[in-house]
Amino acid sequence: MFKFSPLSLLALFFVVFQADAAEYAFITNQLDNSVSIIDVERQTVLKNLIVSGKPAGVAVNSKHYQAYISTPEGGGFTVIDTQKLQVSNKIPGRGASLGIAVDAHGERVFLADWYENTVDVYSAETFQKIQTIHVGRSPSGMAVSPDNKWLYVANRMDDSLSQIDLSHYRLRNTTKTGLHPFGIVVSSDGSRIYTANVESDDVTVLQPDHLKRIKHIAVGDRPYAVALALKDKRLFVTNQDDNTVSVIDTDTLTEIKRIEVGEKPEGISTAGNDRHVYVANWMDGTVSVIDAEKLQVINTIITGEGSRAFGQFVMP
């Protein structure tokens, strides 16, 4: 029988605690069919995994220690084990999958199909398909409300946002946004939805009740995706064609600054500290790290060719 001294038990606890506390960012590199795994604390790439099918979208599931990567070429998604940092499964699909999300309890995975105009719902336990929901044309970004009641879907070619009742998998409401909405984020209290509208160069702010539009906020050229930081006080928006990130004050709903990042910024996500914002730069193959308080880039991390990372890609 093994015996451990109090000191060795403390050391063992510290190692386990460190492993549990690790935070990773999963960056899809679409042009070289890989995913770069970034250690968020050290802001360095730990590992590059081969993921075929032109990986694009990302969703993370803390409950099951998994990251899900949409693969538009051939459809479906790839599963990464976030403890072993390796590919653990490949789930086949139809058409061209792009947007991907996880429900608030980590029990379901939602996969948007660009060509089929549907969202497929999968069990996060078995990966069996539960339901197929028909939405608007070219569904892309998705986000789940914090109370797990609603799934919001940006229908890019319809210039609209759909709200899906997750209790019955029914379409509750659809409303117009700006032109070609793509990325979506929901505030932590569920009271606001923000969409980045690629063709109208603005962000639409909506309320969940009847999807009432509050405001359109002008940003940079071809906004792609959005992320919140600093207890939802700041909204960050990637502007693909002017290589900047717009910063919006969510109290006044006005743009307060544009931060220069890498070339053609696309995916954006906030670290668990709620302060560091990660931006995937498609043309540079890099990730810019923004300090949300100082409103400046504090680091640039080399990743892979065609870094996209569309969705929630940072996992605490």
Image (tube, rainbow, N blue to C red):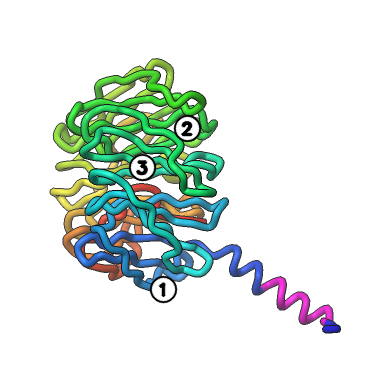
The vertical placement of 246 against 163, above or below, is below
| Mark 2 residue type | Ser
Q: Answer whether labels 2 and 3 touch (C-beta < 8 Å).
A: no
Describe the element under mark 1 as helix, strand or loop: strand
Residue located at (56% from left, 41% from top): 105
Give the residue at mark 2. 145
- Which range is magenta? 4-14
Cα–Cα gap, marks 2 and 3: 16 Å
Magenta stretch: dominant secondary structure: helix
Cα–Cα gap, marks 3 and 1: 27 Å
Is residue 279 toward the left or the right of residue 148 in the image?
left
Residue located at (40% from left, 40% from top): 110
Give the residue at mark 3. 111
Q: Nearer the viewer, mark 2 or mark 3?
A: 3
Q: Is residue 10 magenta?
A: yes
Q: Earlier in the sequence, mark 2 or mark 3?
A: 3
Characterize the local packing of mark 2: few (<14), some (14-19) or many (20 or more) Cα atoms within 10 angstroms: many
The vertical placement of 9 against 141, above or below, is below
Q: Is residue 114 magenta?
A: no
Q: Which mark is residue 46?
A: 1
Location of the N terminus (image quadrant): bottom right
**Residue 180 in picture, x, y percent from top left:** 19, 33
| Mark 1 residue type | Leu
Q: Quadrant of residue 194?
A: top left
Describe the element under mark 3 as helix, strand or loop: strand
Q: Answer whether labels 3 and 1 touch (C-beta < 8 Å).
A: no
Is residue 223 toward the left or the right of residue 311 in the image?
left
Q: Nearer the viewer, residue 236 or 184?
A: 184
